[in-house]
Structures are given as structure tokens and as C-alpha cells.
Image (tube, helix red, strand yellow):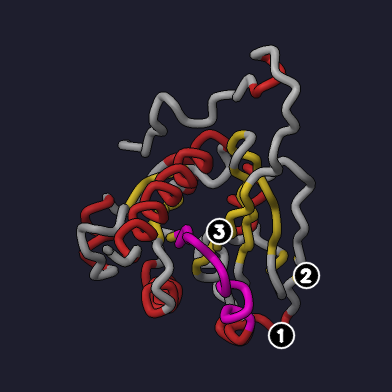
Amino acid sequence: MDYVRSPDWAWQSDPGPQAAGHSQPTKPPIPVKIIVAGGFGVGKTTTVGAISEIAPLTTEAEMTMASVGVDNPGQRVEKTTTTVAMDFGCVTIDRSLKLYLFGTPGQSRFGFMWDDLTRGALGAIVVVDPGRLDDCYPAVDYIEQADVPFVVAVNAFDGQLARDLDTVRWALAIGERIPVVAFDARDRLAVRDVLLVVLEIALAHALHDQPSY
């Protein structure tokens, strides 16, 4: 399986000015808002929890009989909770950059929250379950319409992909300019690598939108 790999320079510890013998105060890192979106039960909460340097804030609630026939976890029968508001975590890239991760709820009845969560976001990860691609269309459509640069991250449940990446790209009708990568939402390094791709395309998007003088 081809997983996305981070560039060699990424996530290196910065010695800072004090290590070089300087006593200048360091500036606080620039905050960057990243959305983690996707359908119900695709691994958004797991993604945020795997990378967050703080105990992630989650709004998980027990699934009840009222959700039967409404919330479909597919073959993930072990799933007993669901996000009813949002997930939140953060991770420091280096001394200059800190990412704040906001996970969206997956059910359509909580869709009214997406506008608030995506406001001000510089990039997004759309987490996809390759075995339930139909559940991913709303998230892809929403992020595209919001004009937020995004990466489609195909979650390798049990270490395997139900469909290859080219099939996922074709099924979701995603253009070549949008990265489609495989990752394991449980693995910190895999999530890190996806975030680095998001930062790359967010930077490219920002440079492209700058007016020319």
C-alpha cells in the first residue's frame, strides 16, 4: 500500500535563538485552523486523537436504539458512540506554526454546525471509508463549495484498503489537483504526513489567490 510520506525537513525540532546564543524572546506560533471532515464512522475522532498533543476534546455520546436505521456504521459493529458536536485537538509543528484541529460531526442532522466549524479554516482533511464511499459525497461537496483546500485521506481500516486510490478518486469525481492519500487514522505519523500535505496545498492556494502588482 502506498502511504503518503512527509518531506525530510518536516517536523524537525527547531533549536531556536537561545541555542544559538541569542536571548531574543521567541514569537508565539502562528495558529492555523484545520478541519477534519467526513461521513459517519469514518475515523475523524480517531484522527484528531492520534495526533493531538493535548487530551482531545470530544463530544461523544452513546448510540441508542433511536439511531438504528439512521446512523449506519457499516461493518464497524464495534462502534458504540458518535460525535454530536465536534472534536478538538492541537499540535505544534515547530516554533512558528501550531495547528488547531476541528472534527465535524458525521451525521447530516448536525450539518448546521459545519458553517461555524469551517469558518476561518485554511485547510481540511476529508476522511474516507473506502468501503462506504456513498457516505463521503456530502463532505467532499461541502468542502469544495466552501473553497477550502483539502486532502482526501482514505482510512485503511484493519491495515487494508477496500478500494485502491484511483478507484476512490474516480468514484468521488475528484480532480487531479486534489491529493488522495492512504493513511491509518490510528497512527500518529500517518496523520502527521497527511497534515503536511494539507499545509502544502493550503500554502499553494494562498499564494495563488494573492493579487499580482
Q: Residues within 10 Å of mark 3 (few under 14, many from 20)?
A: many
- Residue for badge 1: 66
**Dot 2 and dot 1 residues touching (CB under 8 Å):** no
Q: Position of residue 31 (x, y in %)?
A: 63, 53
Relative image position of residue 37 (x, y in whole percent): 52, 66
The quarter of the picture where the N terminus appears is: top left
At label 2, which amino acid type do we have?
Ala
Q: Which residues are magenta?
A: 113-127
- First of labels 1, 3 by sequence position: 3
Residue receiving disc 3: 34
Under mark 1, the amino acid is Ala
Element type at marker 1?
A: helix
Label 3 amino acid?
Ile
Q: CA distance from mark 2 to mark 1?
A: 13 Å
Instruction: Tell me the mark number nearer the camera, choosing from 2 and 1.
Output: 2
Give the residue number, with chain letter if any, for mark 2. Answer: 61
Q: Nearer the viewer, mark 3 or mark 2?
A: 3
Answer above or below: position of 176 versus 184: below
133 with respect to 119 (left or right): left
User: Is residue 54 rendered to the left or right of residue 193?
Assistant: right
Nearest to the eye among marks 1 and 3: give it: 3
Residue located 69% across and 68% down the image: 86
Disc 3 element: strand
Q: Is residue 134 above or below residue 81?
A: below
Q: How many residues crowd mark 2 within 10 Å: few (<14), some (14–19), many (20+)?
A: few
